[in-house]
Structures are given as C-alpha cells and as structure tokens.
Amino acid sequence: MLSKLRRWLREGAILLVLLAGVIILLDVWRSPQMPAMFDSTPLHTLDGETVTLASISEERPVLLYFWASWCGICRFTTPDVARLQSEGENVMTIALRSGNDGEVSRWLSRKGVTFPVVNDSGGEISRNWEISVTPTLVVVSKGQVVTTTSGWTSYWGMKLRLWRAAMF
C-alpha cells in the first residue's frame, strides 16, 4: 500500500512539472512585445487622465491588463484585477475591441468594477503589442516588461508577479 502511494505521488509530481513546463512554454510563445517607445506613448483613460507606462511604473510595478468585454475567461480574471486595484496595487487596463467609450463605461458599471481603462476600440494598441490572447497580463517596471502571461491567472498569481517585480 505504501509503495502504491509513493508511486502515485511520484507520478503526480512528474505531471505537475510537465504541466508547469507546458504553461511556461505557452507563455513564452504567446508573450506580447512592447512596441518601441511605448513606455513614453501617452495613454488616454476613460476618466480623461493621460499617463505613460514609464511614469506609472517608475516607483512601483504596474499590472497592465489586456481584456475584452466579450472574453469569457476575462469574466473570472477581471474581478481579481479590480480587487488588486482596490487594495492599492498599481493597475492599468486596456479594453480590446469592446466598443466605444460609452459602451465600455456601461459594461464596467454593470460589472461593478472600477479601475483605470484605456479603450482600444479599434485594436491598434493590442496589435502593436502583438496580443493574440485575452486576457493577457503584463507587468511593467520602470518602463520595461518584467513578466507576461496570458489566459486565466489567479489573484495570487497576479499578486506574486507584482511582488516579484518589486523585489528586483
């Protein structure tokens, strides 16, 4: 019985390592590329603020969250991003092809989330970043991309990425 349990534990550990390897390879393959000079490109949020990635990531890392109102997985990720922002984490979001400013604002109201949003209604920003999957999360520190991931990510996964970026 004990040998059977050890074998199951060993096989479970091997499976977890293989799964982690596949996830890392997918993140590398789908990782977005920050366009040249994007860190200093002005971004206009729905609330009328103009910011740059360099300015908002200078003192502490920023979580740049590419999402869409039509994205099924974003339904699970968006509340966690809003929670991080409400807890004081540095968050900037980009709504990918989710309609005009009014439609995005109404969607945010219906969902009860409040975080800074840049509306990428035509998809130009996302194309420049080579975003191929929503949601995509990018951690930027001092105007440089530190880490990226796409698809579903847990609250703790996002928090850990921001913490790690702040440490280095």
Image: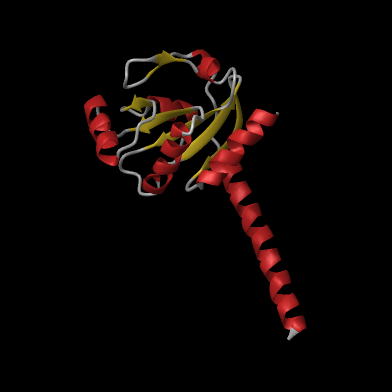
Left or right, 50 with reference to 165: left
Left or right, 117 with reference to 109: right
In the rendered image, which quarter contains the C terminus? top right
Name the outermost residue toward the right. 3
Q: Quadrant of residue 112?
A: top left
**Residue sitting at 44 percent across and 38 percent down?**
83
Q: In x, y percent, where is residue 12?
A: 67, 68
**Residue sitting at 31 percent across and 28 percent down?**
121
Residue 73 drawn above or below residue 162 = below
**Residue sitting at 37 percent across and 15 percent down?**
49
| Foreground residue among 100 and 126 | 100
| Foreground residue among 112 and 101 | 112
Q: In x, y percent, where is residue 55?
A: 53, 14
How did the renderer colour the structure? secondary structure
Q: In x, y percent, where is residue 136?
A: 48, 38
Residue 120 drawn above or below residue 158 = above
In the rendered image, which quarter contains the N terminus? bottom right
**Residue sitting at 46 percent across and 26 percent down?**
128
